[in-house]
Image (cartoon, rainbow, N blue to C red):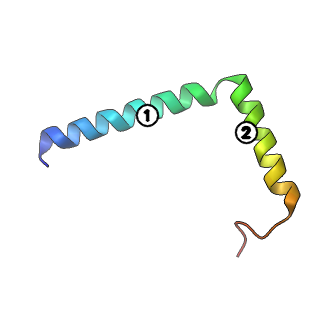
Amino acid sequence: MGFLGKALKSAAAAKVAQIAVREISKPENQRKAKELLGRATKRGGSAGRA
């Protein structure tokens, strides 16, 4: 894939990043993320630990 393909891929990636930032900034999504993180850390499992 040449220059045009790379440009299209980077434009698509930039749009995805823009949407992700917009969604993360919403208060209801921040609340859901905190709840999910709290549940994951409360379990005390070995996930993510070496």
Residue placed at 22% from the left, 37% from the top? 7
Most distant residue in the left direction: 2
Residue pictured at 81% horizontal, 67% vertical: 45
Residue 27, percent from left and from top: 72, 23
Q: Decide: is 46 above or below 29.
A: below
Any mark on residue 7, and which?
Answer: none
**Of helix, strand and loop, which one carries label 1?**
helix
Q: Quadrant of the C terminus?
A: bottom right
Residue that badge 2 annotates? 33
CA distance separating discs 1 and 2: 19 Å
Asked if residue 11 is positioned above or below residue 2 in the image, the reply reads above
Residue 23 in the figure: left or right of residue 30: left
Q: Residues within 10 Å of mark 2 (few under 14, many from 20)?
A: few
Q: Secondary structure at mark 2?
A: helix
Q: Name the residue tied to disc 1.
A: 16
Amino acid type of the residue that numbered disc 2 sits on in the rendered structure: Ala
| Residue that appears at 49% across and 28% down | 19
In this picture, residue 21 sits left or right of residue 29: left
Residue density around tag 1, few if under 14, some if 14–19, many if 20 or more, within 10 Å = few
Query: Label 2 near label 1: C-beta < 8 Å?
Result: no
Residue at 13% of width from left, 42% of height from top? 3
Mark 1 and mark 2 lie on one chain; the one further toward the N terminus is 1
Q: Residue 35 in the image: x percent, y percent?
A: 81, 40
- Corner quadrant of residue 43: bottom right
For the residue marked with disc 1, what is the amino acid? Val
Asked if residue 30 lies left or right of residue 7, the reply is right
Q: Position of residue 12 (x, y in %)?
A: 33, 34
For the image, the number of numbered tags is 2
